[in-house]
Image: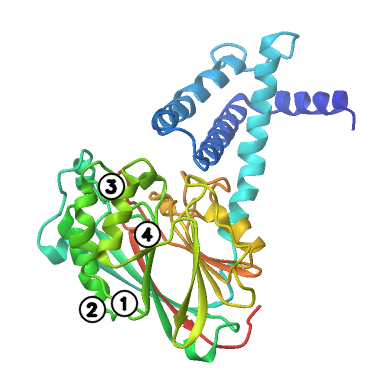
Amino acid sequence: MTPEMLAAYLQSLADALPWWALYLGAIVGHGYLFIVALNVFYGWPWPHELMKYTRKVDLLFVVLGGPVIFGFALDIFDTGQLSWDAGWRSYLAGYTVLCWLVGFGIAPIIEIFYLLRPTAPQLVKETSDSVDVAKELGYAPLGHGKDARMCSLPFNQCFQVEFTQKTLVLPQIPEAWDGLTILHLTDLHFCGSPDRVFYEYVMDRCMKDGVPDLLLLTGDVVDSEWHHRWIVPVLGKLRWNVGAFAILGNHDYWQDVSLIRRRLRRVGMTVLGNSWQQIDVRGEPMIVVGHEGPWFTPIPDLTQCPAGIFRLCLSHAPDNIGWARAHRMDLVLAGHVHGGQIRPPVLGSVFVPSRYSRKYDCGTFYEAPTVMHVGRGLAGQHPLRYFCKPEVTRIILRKGPANV
C-alpha cells in the first residue's frame, strides 16, 4: 500500500465515523501517547528542576490540550468534520486520526498484554497481610511534610501497609540456602509525611515476623534536606543474621549523598553504590551487586567478578533489567516506580517513571536468566495510594527443580 493509498483510506475511515466517536477516541489516544511519553521521560536522569515542572505541563496538555485540539480539528460546533485541505488543518486532521487509532486500537491491545503479563514461574507461593498502621496506632500519623494533608484524602491507603511473603524456587542456589530469607525495603522517602512513628511501627513489625538472613534496601531513603536524621533511629530497629546492603536512588541523588551514605553505615549497612562484593552465606559464596544507575555513574564494573557464583543485584530502577540479564544476575530487587501509586481497577497503573513505561511497575518477573522483584515501596514524594498499598517484601529462597 502506497502512502497515498493509506492516506485516502484513513480519510475515508474518518469521514465515515460520527464526530463524537472520532473525538472521544482521539482524546483517549492523545492522553495515552503523552502519558507514555512522560513515563519514558522520567526514566532518564534529567535535571531535577526540569522534571518538577514537566509532569504539570504534560498533564495540563492531556487534560485541556486534547479536547481543545480535537474540538477545533473536528469543528464540533459546526460541520463535525475534519478538513483535509492543504495547510495546517490537514496536519490536525492527520493527528486526530492517529490518536483515534491509538485510543480505540493500539492502546486496548497493549492493555490486554499488560493485564496478561506472566508472573515469574519461580514464584511458587505468595501471601500477604495488610496492616492499617493508623488503626494500630490509634491515630493517623500525618506528620509535618509539605503534603501532609494528602494523607487525609478520602480512601487514601498510604497507611495500609502490605507485608508480603514470596517464596521463590531457584534451582541454582546451594542446598545450604534452602529457606534463606531476604527482607526487601525500598522507597522510604523520609520527608515528614508519613510521620516517623509510621516507619518505626513498620520496622518493628518486620522484626516481629522474624530476623531475616539478608536485609536489602534499594534506594530513595531520604526526600528532604532535613530527614536524613530519621535514618539511624528508624533503620536502627532492624536486625539481620548475615548482612545488610543498601544503595541509593534518584531522590537521594538530589540530597546530600555523602551524609545519607554515612548514616546508613552507622546503622551497620554496607552501602554498595555502583560496586559488588563477595560474601559468605551459610558457608557458600554469593556476589552482591549494587546498581544506582542511571543517576549515579559509572555503572558497576564486573570485569573482575568471578563467574559461576550466585549473583544478587540491588537496583533502584527496574530499567536496569537489560544490564542485569547481560551480566547474568540470578536475582534482582528493585523499586523506584511505586507500582504507580494510583492503580484504577482493571486499568492498572498509569504514571510509572520508567523507560519501559508500565511493563515493570510491580511484581515478580522472569527474563532469562534473571528473576526480578519490583517492590511498591513504603512511601513517596506525594503520600497518595489508591488500589496500590505500600509494601514490604520478605522473600524465601527454596532449592528445587526448574519450573521454566
Q: Which tag is nearer the camera, tag 1 or tag 4?
A: 1
Most extreme residue toward the front, as rendered? 304
Q: Which residue is drawn at 75% across and 9% down?
A: 86
Name the spot of residue 313 as percent of width and height, x first: 51, 65
Q: How far apart are marks 4 and 3 (CA)?
A: 15 Å
Observer able to see residue 194 = no
Q: Which residue is drawn at 43% across and 83% down?
A: 180
Q: Name the residue under label 1.
A: 240
* 192 vs 266, nearest the viewer: 266
Task: Answer few, some or many: residues within 10 Å of disc 1's Cα (few below 14, many 20 plus, some between 14 and 19).
Answer: some
Report the quarter where the C terminus lies.
Answer: bottom right
Q: Mark 2 or 4 closer to N-term?
A: 4
Q: Mark 3 or 1 closer to N-term?
A: 1
Q: Which tag is nearer the camera, tag 4 or tag 3?
A: 4
Q: Please tell me whether mark 3 sits on a helix, a strand or a loop.
A: loop
* 117 vs 276, nearest the viewer: 276
Task: Answer few, some or many: residues within 10 Å of disc 2's Cα (few below 14, many 20 plus, some between 14 and 19).
Answer: few
Q: Distance between the residues labelled 2 and 1?
A: 12 Å
* 63 vs 41, nearest the viewer: 41
Q: Name the residue under label 3.
A: 383
Q: How many numbered circles are shown?
A: 4
Most extreme residue toward the right, as rendered? 1
